[in-house]
Amino acid sequence: MFRKILIANRGEIACRVMETARKLGIRTVAVYSDADANAKHVAMADEAYRLGPAPVGESYLKIDAIIDACRRSGAEAVHPGYGFLSENPIFVDALAKAGIAFIGPSADAIRAMGLKDAAKALMEKAGVPVVPGYHGDNQDPTFLKDQADKIGYPVLIKARAGGGGKGMRRVDDPKDFLSALEGAQREGEASFGDGRVLIEKYLTKPRHIEIQVFGDNHGNAVHLFERDCSLQRRHQKVIEEAPAPDMPEEMRKAMGEAAVTAAKAIDYSGAGTIEFIADVSEGLSADRFYFMEMNTRLQVEHPVTEMITGEDLVAWQLQVAAGNPLPKTQEEITFSGWAFEARLYAEDAPKGFLPAIGTLSHLRFPEGTVRIDSGVRSGDEITPFYDPMIAKVIVHGPTRDAALAKLLAALEETEVAGCVTNAAFLASLCRHEGFSKGDVDTGLIDRDLQSLIAESAPSDEAIALAALSALGLTEPHKGSDPWDSLAGWRMWSASRQYALLEIDGERRDVEVHALGAGRFTVHLGDEPQTYALREIENGTIVFDCNGVHRTAAIAMGLDDLTVFFGGNAHSFGLPDRLADDDEAAGAGDQVIAPMPGLVKLLQGKPGDTVTRDQPLVVLEAMKMEHTLKAPRDGVIGEVMVAAGEQVQDGTVLLMLVEEESDAA
């Protein structure tokens, strides 16, 4: 076994690999960019080496810098994690030339599966079923449109070097094909340096089911059963589970055998995933699943497989890369129970899942039987440079219902402040009737998106606790001074105070009367409510409201606070009464960057007449494109940015003016 390995990655996956390495007595080496100098994975490692500035092209993608870190540290092998260089055969070749082991497949295997079109041709030859479509080299737009017309709409345009939903477009109408093709090519070029695409038939009710495979350098290959990854938005996975709901044993056997066949066809070694798409218009069937692609690395969702099989897949990777045979044969691999993984991201679900940035001023996860894989800590910053994942919330239960209930409880108990997250959206998915019953397909989220992202209004209890906190009345008592318990109390009459809160963009004064000894009345409706604060410690508050015993948590920021109560998180602004309102005049006249990003495309110039919702700017953030539209009808008056320019959130990109009417 290796004595020391370098993890050529960051965040959650770097920390995950280090945990297993530490259990096996293997020393670890971290690498980092300037943005990650104080990151969790750097703190966890035995030693760490700087790669360069924050942009990935100047840090985590610098092969020479990583090899230099290996030489300086004496690392014998490199674990690539996922993303970055994990599926780059040039990196694998460079490591081999330097005499450093790669904890993953061979460069030849990566090349064989790296391009979707070539991989599909290879699988078809090996007898693995593939989705009907065009996987050839001709990239002429007119030719590709003709192929799409022959396949029949809807079709899916996919960057052949793609992954994670990047460079992918669904087209329902022939007239939209060419513009969708341009977008897919642009995104493929930006993300993978390859704008070539393939065209596939889009299944109207598909499920995304993948098989975890493992091979070694002794000719062995096995599978560790399936994962269902059908809950997706914009082709990116949201919640994964294992096993797949309602999976017939015949189909499980057929998919497992097909996946092992695919792995053996390229002499695969290490961890890999064969991704299939299943047509479930008439339910799951062993004759209606098709090969999509192979990921020649460890998947983000690998923990659900670990939970049901009891195997440590990173430990398997290390064993195989060190030259050992697979730890188990196919007959020895079993599974039990059910597992779920929810991806907790810094993103704004109601605003189209826009990635968010900010400092995690408060971060607390439930303790106990819930597994949390995370690469951040309270106080860490979510930057615009990398994937905005905060954590993976992973649970296991004896049945699907039990595991799903545990996942919902874990999400409701998760506390994040300082940055908007998708936690409420994930909890809504857990409560979704169809998902609860296992009736899932890749279109579920899009169909029910509005109900899933609906934001619940803060309850009276949450508003009251916010008001008490804003007035400093929920601060923990310090020392033994009995007067500490009488905050806000007056001798001759009840103390009347007003907390100014900003709730969903509107300011509200909340009247609070202090009754002494941690007791208050809060006036929100017709009848004031009485609150008795029983215990306050580390942001957790135990209180009585009109005689009912409740628990909540408060996270205070500089100009806001967050109340975690009843399974929901509500943020309240704390406006300065003395500050003038500073609303941007004519906000409807501006197109503003909603997040930091790169201006990829400007679709208008000064003097152009535009209509409401007309696409005007394409902004790229975290390798995904976001189209910004005209807020109203009008004329473009001024364009403040140029294509290729990096902008911050809040930047005014262009201005609209009123269209001049014809004078008589």
Image (cartoon, grey):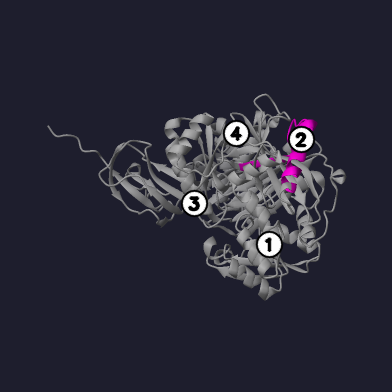
Q: Which-is-in-front pick, marks 3 and 1?
A: 3
Residue placed at 60% from the left, 37% from the top?
Answer: 529
Amino acid bearing label 4: Pro
Residue 451 lies, in percent from the top left, at: 56, 31
Rendered image: mark on residue 132: 4
> Which of the marked residues, 4 or 1, is nearer the chain's N terminus?
4
Res 491 visible: no
Question: In the image, which residues are magenta?
Answer: 237-264
Residue placed at 62% from the left, 62% from the top?
Answer: 91
- The span from disc 2 to disc 4 (Cα, nearest Å) is 19 Å
Residue 256 highlighted magenta (yes or no): yes
Q: Residues within 10 Å of mark 4 (few under 14, many from 20)?
A: few
Q: Which residue is mark 1?
A: 479
Q: Which-is-in-front pick, marks 4 and 1?
A: 4
Instruction: Name the element at disc 3.
Output: helix
> Which of the marked residues, 3 or 2, is nearer the chain's N terminus?
3
Locate the N terminus by quadrant.
bottom right
The extreme front residue here reads 125
- The span from disc 3 to disc 1 (Cα, nearest Å) is 62 Å
- In contact (CB < 8 Å): disc 3 and disc 2: no
Res 14 visible: yes
- The span from disc 4 to disc 1 (Cα, nearest Å) is 73 Å
Rendered image: mark on residue 189: 3
- The span from disc 3 to disc 2 (Cα, nearest Å) is 36 Å
- The span from disc 2 to disc 1 (Cα, nearest Å) is 68 Å
> Is residue 231 toward the left or the right of residue 523 in the image?
right
Amino acid bearing label 3: Glu
Q: Which residue is mark 2?
A: 254
Q: Residues within 10 Å of mark 3 (few under 14, many from 20)?
A: some
Residue 577 highlighted magenta (yes or no): no
The extreme right residue here reads 332
> Is residue 149 toward the left or the right of residue 563 in the image?
left
